[in-house]
Image (tube, rainbow, N blue to C red):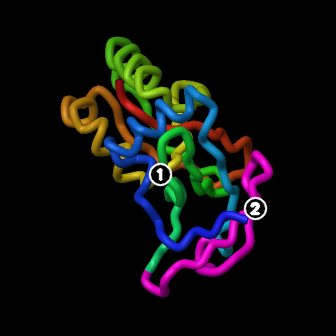
Amino acid sequence: MLRLTDIVGNASDPDIADRLHHIEHDGGVERVRLSRNDLARRRQRLVTDRGTELALMLDRGAQLENGSVLLLEPGRAVLVMLDEPQWLVLRAAHAAGALEIGYFAGNMHWKVRFEADCLWIALEGPREGYLKRMTHLLARGDATVLDAPAQGGTRYLAVPHAH
């Protein structure tokens, strides 16, 4: 059983995201799916999507969140994924903006879905991190951020990253 006592960081951090990207390509990223209630628990037994048993023992001040990285070493990482979907919804202002937003999301390897005239981005880290990466598109008015309605759906599991 793997004993984990710290949160290394978050998958949305550019430095960590880059490392996770390389580990993901080598098949070394394991994921633990947690509910919102489980995110508040600091001590728990978990099993990753690859069957690795974990004993999580965090300090009182530690706060798990979607995208928390529990282990990051050469060739291996353990990533916390919220079991409930969270989405960032964008509506392009014009066709050129839609193309650029789509290209950008693809380049970041973000998992997306399309509904009507909106692009839904599956959040795998704090929403603010995604918005920060898209500041140039939002500031120019190429897209508007809409509130995503709460709903069930597929939870995409990928590591957001940049090239």
The answer to which of 104 and 42 lies nearer the viewer is 42
Q: Is residue 56 left or right of residue 143?
A: right
**CA distance separating discs 1 and 2:** 23 Å
Which quadrant of the view contains residue 19?
top left
Q: Residue furthest right?
A: 51
**Hey, what amino acid is under mark 2?**
Glu
Taking the spot 48% from the left edge, 87% from the top edge, the residue there is 60
The answer to whether 44 appears left or right of 105 in the picture is right
Vertical comparison of 62 with 53: above or below: below
Q: Residues within 10 Å of mark 2 (few under 14, many from 20)?
A: some
State the residue position of label 1. Answer: 125
In which quadrant of the rendered view does residue 153 lie? top right
Mark 2 secondary-structure assignment? strand
Judging by the rendered image, the residue that carries numbered circle 2 is: 53
- Residue 44 coordinates in the image, percent (x, y): 70, 76
Per the rendered image, the range of residues in magenta is 39-61
Q: Quick check: is 60 in the magenta stretch?
A: yes
